[in-house]
Image (cartoon, rainbow, N blue to C red):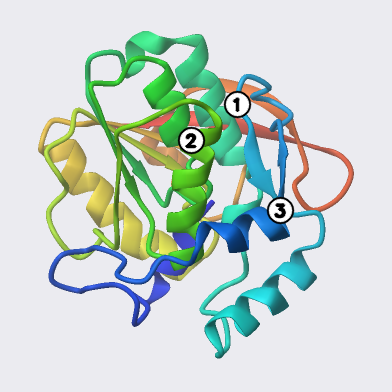
Amino acid sequence: MGCRRYTACSQECDAHTGQVSRPVPGSFVLIHTRPDHPSLVPEVRLHVADDVVTLWEAMEDERGRQADAPPFWAAAWPGGQVLARHVLDSPEVVAGRRVLDLGSGSGLVAIAAALSGAARVVASEIDEFGVTAIALNAQLNGVSGIDVVGDLLAGPPPDVDVVLAGDICYDREMTERVLPFLDRACAAGAEVLIGDPGRMYLPVDRLTAVVAHEVPETEGPGLRRSTVWQLA
């Protein structure tokens, strides 16, 4: 999911360049996760955690301070899964185009875009653990050339043709931050697609449904109907 870290840019994020300056060693991610296939996207493998609480504690030990956020990068969230599924099923959405994966988290959507022939993929993620996970997950799937950047929400969107945003409307504050950025991207000519499992803050009155799938819950049993929406 990833976008939860955007509530405040951590001290590891350079406010001028948008780059995360201190990603963690890859060995940390490899020790505390295992490769697995997201339920809806079996073509892709990700380093995921079985015990989020244990991983969270390990993150704090690694940095010697309280973690800025839980390890959202160590799971495949439903909005990201439905976006990745759509990109793989309809590669023309990204093929030959420049793509931004906003709030990349594990890098699932960015990887799907690269596998579907995107000309360039930018993954926006400010969690230093997530930055490392994106690189490892890309390597795990034989993907190269994903450019990882930090917090973009306060400025103009990068020069891309498509913005893919999974699981971004999880609370009012985040929604109020991210929607102006997506509006700017749309005004600049980008196609904006949002993946969401039916969260209450999603502005459905402004969106057009593209495709929906039942996705297994990330945090417990059951299924959540998750939809790819287009912002007009």
Rendering coords of residue 218 (x, y %):
75, 47
Q: Element type at marker 3?
A: loop
Relative side of 227 to 56, left or right = left
Nearest to the observer: residue 220 or residue 59: 59
Q: Element type at marker 1?
A: loop
Identity of the residue drawn at 22% across and 63% down:
18
Nearest to the observer: residue 209 or residue 14: 14
3 and 2 marks in contact (CB < 8 Å)? no
Q: Which residue is the site of mark 2?
A: 139
Relative side of 158 to 70, left or right = left
- Badge 2 amino acid: Gln
Q: Is residue 120 above or below residue 153?
A: above
- Badge 1 amino acid: Val
Q: Which residue is the site of mark 1?
A: 44
3 and 1 marks in contact (CB < 8 Å)? no
Nearest to viewer (mark 3 / mark 1): 3
Identity of the residue drawn at 38% across and 64% down:
126
Rendering coords of residue 210 (x, y %):
47, 20
Q: Which residue is the site of mark 3?
A: 33
Nearest to viewer (mark 2 / mark 1): 2
Q: Earlier in the sequence, mark 3 or mark 2?
A: 3
> What is the CA distance from the residue labelled 2 to the residue labelled 1?
11 Å
- Badge 3 amino acid: Thr
In the image, farthest residue toward the front = 27
The quarter in which the C terminus is drawn is: top left
Rendering coords of residue 147 (x, y %):
28, 43
